Image: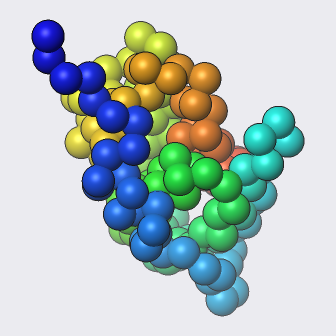
Amino acid sequence: MADQPTLYSPALLTHARAPQHAGRLPAPTHTATVDNPLCGDRVTLHLRLDQGQIAAVAHKTRGCALCIASASVMAAQLAGMTAADGHAAVRSALDTLAPEGDLAAHSHLALFVGLRAAPARARCVALPWQALAAALEET
């Protein structure tokens, strides 16, 4: 029998312990805060858009390792994207996190493949992406 992927892989824990783009962004043009009151996770996302492109990103994430790692992975891929690319990334991530989504097929979400053994925890991973959707709502 093949080993099941672990929920907390070494790569995931690396992001959780030292999240990329963590902190506050001076002079953001777009900000959103979303939370999950059931578990206490909260993500505040700051973006600076310049001529329709994401020029800078920062997040302040309070929550479990899954939520923090997801915010880190998301933030690392956003710089240089257009707002339209950001909207597409949100749709793709949320579709991939759905029970029928193929996490292993998406390089930026592959470290969350262990979610299939704990599907209720997908909400933790989705929260940063929901913050991105909210921040980009006006674009």
- Please, which residue is most extreme toward the bottom here? 26
Q: Residue at x 54, y 75 (%)?
A: 22
Q: Position of residue 48 (x, y in %)?
A: 58, 75
Q: Is residue 119 above or below residue 109?
A: above
Residue 97 visible in the displayed image: yes
Q: On the rendered structure, is 56 left or right of 105?
A: right
Farthest-out residue, front = 1
Query: Residue at position x 68%, y 74% from top?
Result: 29
Q: Position of residue 115 (x, y in %)?
A: 44, 28
32 lies left or right of 125: right
Looking at the rendering, which quadrant does residue 78 occupy? bottom left
Relative to 56, is 120 above or below? above
Q: Is residue 63 above or below residue 8?
A: below
Q: Quadrant of residue 2?
A: top left
Give percent across and percent down for residue 94.
Answer: 51, 30
The answer to whether residue 81 of the structure is visible from this angle is: no
Residue 58 or residue 121, whichever sits in front? 121
Using the image as rendered, state which of residue 138 and residue 65 is in the foreground.
Answer: 65
**Residue lying farthest to the right in this orientation:** 37
Residue 26 shown left or right of residue 116 in the figure: right
Of 74 and 12, which appears nearest the observer?
A: 12
